[in-house]
Amino acid sequence: MSTDKVNRLEEAGGVGYVWVDDRVPASGYLKKQFNKVFPDHWSFMLGEIALYSFILLLLSGTFLSLWFKPSMIEVIYDGSYAPLNGVHMSEAYASTLDISFDIRGGLLMRQIHHWGALFFVAAISVHLLRVFFTGAFRKPRETNWVIGVTLLTLALLEGFAGYSLPDDLLSGTGLRIAQGIMLSIPVVGTYLSFFIFGGEFPGTDFIPRLYTVHVLLVPGIILALITVHLMLVWFQKHTQFPGAGRTERNVVGYPLFPVYTAKAGGFFFVVFGITALMGGLFQINPIWMYGPYIPDQITAGSQPDWYIGWLEGGLRMMPNMEWVIPGGYTISMNVLFPSLILPGIIFTAMALYPWLEAWATGDRRPHHLLDRPRNAPTRTAIGAMSLAFYGLLWIEGGNDIIANTFDLNVFAVTWAMRVALFVVPPLVFVFTRRVCLALQRRDRDKLLHGYESGVIKRLPSGKYYEQHQPISDEEHAVIMARAAAPKPLPMPEKYDDKGVKQKWYAVKMTQAKLSHFFYGDQVPMPTAAEIEEARHHEAEITAERDDEIETSQAEALSPRQ
Amino acid sequence: MTFLLARRRSRWATPVLLMFALAIVGVAYAAIAAQNASADAPRAASSTQIDEGRKLFLEGCSSCHGLNAEGGYQADGSVAGPSLIGAGAASVDFQVSTGRMPLANPGAQAVRKKSIYTPEETAALAAYIASLGPGPAIPTEEQYSTTGITPEEMALGGALFRANCASCHGFSGKGGALTDGKYAPSLTNTDPRHIYSAMLTGPQNMPVFPDSSLRTDDKRAIIAYIETIREQPNNGGIDLGRLGPVTEGLLLFTLGLGALIAVAVWIGVKAK
Amino acid sequence: MTIEPTGEAPETPLPVHHPRRSDIDPRAAKRAERQVGFLFLGSGLASIGFIVAFVATPIDESMYIPFFGDVNASNLLLGLLMGLSLFLIGAAAIHWAKKLMPDVEIVDQRKAEASTQEARDELLDSYVTGIDQTGVKRRPFILGSMFGALALVGLPAIVLLRDLGPLPGNVLRTTMWTSGMRILVAETNQPIRPEDLTVGTLISAVPEGLKEVMEEEGNLNELAKSAVMLIRMDPSEIVSDQTPPDAELPWTYQGILCFSKICTHVGCPLGLYEQLTHHMLCPCHQSTFDLANSGNVIFGPAARSLPQLAITVDDDGYLVAQEGFTEPVGPSFWERG
């Protein structure tokens, strides 16, 4: 016991803390964590938006769960919303109407929950893009990347489940589509559908089961994965952008307490606040206008929430391929491919990407300094191309609304998107790569010749030139970071010195070629000597020119002989 | 002038100018944009009215619909204007007073615009076509007026709207795309008589909902529902067009994520 | 093979720290302090305002926003006040950190990535000793039986899920439609005579007795597969329909056709009927069926034509089905054949 010493912490008012610390000795650990350094960049906060949105969803969702009735039992509505009075509907839908019209703050919480869900998935997506384009998924963070891709998939499922719970016409149509997709799965499709729905569609079991999934199972898994995700970031320390004073062996930034506590804590309130403002200002998912789900009704302009849009677009775009194989079995490729096979390939490729890139470039070093996207032109181009592919599918998901708003033929829109899906991504790839290499050339120029200062001078001979200023040390350090980029692998020898063909030659050759594809076109970095020489040369020329101007000015001002 | 000149380099100059330009364009557009179709009800037919209608028909309609409204054909054999015998007064009243006819340009679909005929001329045309063969009559106010309708009937109208109309016109009556450039128009500004006539006559590609299958009371209930949702406030806030998740997603990425990223940048930027 | 970097990124010192206004000017610091304080106060006011608005605003009152029209007053006020009360705390904390908390960058060293070889060796030793102590190497029977047990212990959990639902059986192949069943208008449940339909009419319809079946089963399953559409066109416009060559009666009746309302793509209900072109468009993924031509698909992802229901007229003159559907309705499935 410390009663014989003056306990400074107790004096400072931390009596409660001391009580805990007497039982679990945490002070040493906490002291270190208080001074833990976090690097500062706005793009590092995108993941935080996702985290705070998730907490917000847990809170607002708990509120909603106090009134929502996850039941498909038919009731007759007699609440405040007149246009639905006397209409038969499920209890789930009726309770959602009650939340929206008869519980104060109910509609606000519903809208906060829904906007929050949209933010959640959007934030995960842009966070994923940031991590991808800066190469933060490289060793030692591959596992965290896979956890992230898993979180994205779970978030998509969770959102779909969430907006389907109210059992309204729009989301019920989405469930019907999901069930149709299930039916298309070979061999087990009908069994899967009957087990999940407790029989035929729509049945009466699905909404209660979906509720358990949405409220308990998936949030639990997400919470566990987020915890592991954050623990890995904590222990591996966050990556940082290259710059002055930053190396692979350190982290430069601000301490957790008080600076990051204030900034990150503040950002949590900002995310919550902006979501609440949107919940109050902008109507979202007005289920009372959609009406209850009845399987023979539908609305024009049926779309899922934005994050499912790309799957919807795939379903709309796909040509009507269906095969009946011997035995009388049907393979509905028109449904299977865009909704299950293609997403399966995409998510698998995404999850495996760190290993794919490590193999293709041969770069298995750990990386804690981020890549500027321009310094990894092929990776950036692959990312841009994938984004273009995704974006085109997403646009097709809204093809009828686009057609109606812009007076276009909806069939023509679909055909245009079908063509664009194959034509645009390769173009985007080539374009992005060229832009990256052009930016590298610009960087090299800046190193050697400085930046254009905007000061234009005219020589007596009549020639105009722009003065260049040397770049700052900070910028110099940032540009020079590309020196750490890997060189392409050397081409393997086909035969060793005894004339025997090397094992795995074809594989090694492919790997070498891929590494050239990734890093073969880098603009050469100037050496330190070259930079020094160029600067010296630049300074000389500037001095010469300034001299010339001065001399001629002096001559002009002096009296004629 | 010096007040403005002195502030031309202010950092507010560009935003203010932009708002000003936007306001001018908005006002100019509103002033020039087409008016709604007239909604006055026509009078009952008389023989002079039928003659007048025939004259108007020959002048403005026969070039496509044929001299005796038997239908007109183009040089390549395709239909220029279908036969109007049996089309009934209701079709004419709908097409002409919403300005869809005469067609301004041939296209996938007749577009609603300002009617070029007065209500009396429209009535005359309708009377003439009605005289050529029996067809649906112009709906009376008794049939389409929703005064005195009970809330239960209006709710039934909603159920009928969702069962029969929403698949083309959308859950909010904002309209929807059909094939090959055709569309189901928005019902935001359609008056009750025209809604009734459209259901009754099935203009162009809209299916026909005759009174024998969708009774007058049902039609009136549907009209009541449409009027109710048109007028009702947007409970949740600004409505983003009542088009569903597409516009909601658009707002999310522009305003929503934009605002959050703006704050993130504010956090990350070094304080001065 | 090991990778070679293209060059060496030189180590550079930290950038020079530039003091902020609030670091050097005590008045600027005071101003920042006031700003942070007022932001916190604003939040407090908004929180109290929320409570007042919650109690004072009737839940069904609308208010008018310029340009945007009428919205619900309670939702707007509660949202604005809650939003402000949260946002201002965040803004205050961020402003406080940016202006008043130190902004000098500090450096922390990263620890080694991996454990030392020594640590790994020690772990390996502990592990090997432990395995030795279990004696599995000398007792393969334990090892084998253990793996066997573990492999099987998970199966009960899977088997417990069997009663989630019935086996599909033949349910997907049949609907309640049968010979002589009247066709009723959906929602109003009236029977239909051919004279009720003019050319160009579209009616959403259901089988007679559907209401009772749904009440008995307590669900909407039968509606989800037996919903149909009645369309009337001029008989001369029917190019083909699905009447088999050996049928006694045609499947159509005086230009009236009956098709399943459920799209053969993934099951959305149809309804966008174009009277002049006889095209039926599905709003979900734009599958288009030509109803004048056996319901064949002319655009979109649906692979199979729309199932047609054979109809005729009963003795009282009402439209009835001749028999049930002769193929499964709705989306395709593996066993469909």
Image: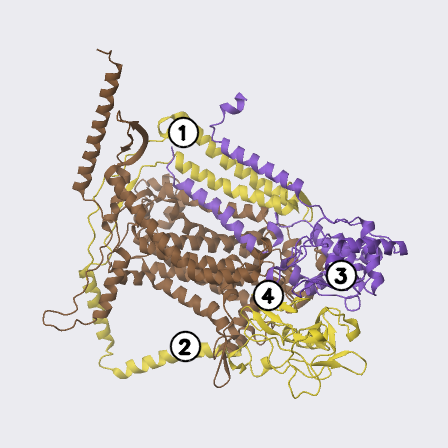
Chain colours: A brown, B purple, C yellow
Residue C13 image position (x, y, % from top left) = 23, 39
Rate crowding at label 2 as few (under 14), some (14 to 19) or many (20 or more) other CA atoms within 10 Å. few
Look at mark 4 in the image and give the residue it sits on. Answer: A172
Q: Looking at the picture, which amino acid does disc 2 mark?
A: Gly
Residue A276 image position (x, y, % from top left) = 54, 47
Quadrant (top left/top right/bottom left/bottom right) for the C terminus of chain A: top left
Label 3 to label 2: alpha-carbon separation: 80 Å
Q: Looking at the picture, which amino acid does disc 3 mark?
A: Gly
Most extreme residue toward the right, as rendered?
B47
Instruction: Assign a secondary structure to mark 1.
Output: helix
Nearest to the eye among marks 4 and 2: give it: 4
Q: Is residue C32 left or right of residue A470?
A: right
Label 4 to label 3: alpha-carbon separation: 49 Å
The disc label shown at residue C29, or none: 1
Rate crowding at label 1 as few (under 14), some (14 to 19) or many (20 or more) other CA atoms within 10 Å. some
The disc label shown at residue C154, or none: 2
Please say if the residues under marks 2 and 1 sit with CB atoms less than 8 Å apart. Answer: no
N-terminal of the pair, mark 2 or mark 1, is 1
For the question of whether residue A235 can be seen, the reply is: no
